[in-house]
Amino acid sequence: MRATINGKRVTDRDSLHLLLRKKLNLPESCGKNLDAVYDVLTEPGKDRIITVKHEALLRERLGDYADRLFRMLEDAQESGHVKVIIKE
């Protein structure tokens, strides 16, 4: 599965989680926190390619939460089930 997370569409944490849920086909039971997103992303058999656009804008709008987001994506990538591509 391929998904794009566009920083232009994110204004705060809630809009980020709404976008993640939609673009990554996350189940309704997935909580609005990065630990829950990580758990779903790293499930075996559900490989994903995630492209992140406008990283600087995400960081500006989300502050420290953006650092946590990118750390989670790096950790998920290490699982072998997720590939992350960052584009500005």
Image (cartoon, helix red, strand yellow):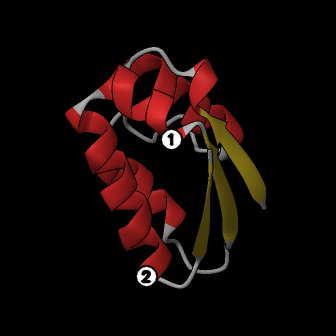
| Residue at horizontal 58 percent and vertical 42 percent from the top | 27
Q: In this view, does 9 lie to the left or right of 61?
A: right
- Viewer-proximal residue, 48 or 52? 52
- Viewer-proximal residue, 18 or 29? 18
In which quarter of the view is residue 59 placed? top left
| Residue at horizontal 52 percent and vertical 72 percent from the top | 43
Where is residue 53 drawn, in percent x and y?
64, 42
- Residue type, label 2: Glu
Q: Nearer the viewer, mark 2 or mark 1?
A: 1
Where is residue 7 drawn, in percent x and y?
57, 30
Crowding at dot 1, Cα within 10 Å, few <14 / some 14-19 / many 20+, comes out as some
Q: Residue furthest left?
A: 64
- Residue type, label 1: Glu
Q: Name the residue under label 2.
A: 78
> Is mark 2 in CB contact (under 8 Å) with mark 1?
no
Q: For residue 69, which numbered disc appears in the image?
A: none
- Viewer-proximal residue, 79 or 52? 52
Q: Mark 1 points at which residue?
A: 55
Exactly how many numbered labels are in the figure?
Answer: 2
Mark earlier in primary sequence (2, 1):
1
Q: In this view, does 70 lie to the left or right of 16?
A: left
| Residue at horizontal 49 percent and vertical 71 percent from the top | 42
Helix or strand or loop: what does disc 1 sit on?
A: helix
Where is residue 73 drawn, in percent x and y?
43, 60
Image quadrant where one finds the N terminus: bottom right
Is 8 rendered above or below residue 35?
above
Q: Residue furthest right?
A: 1
Image quadrant where one finds the C terminus: top right
- Viewer-proximal residue, 64 or 46? 64
| Residue at horizontal 58 percent and vertical 36 percent from the top | 54
Compute the Cα span from label 2 to label 1.
20 Å
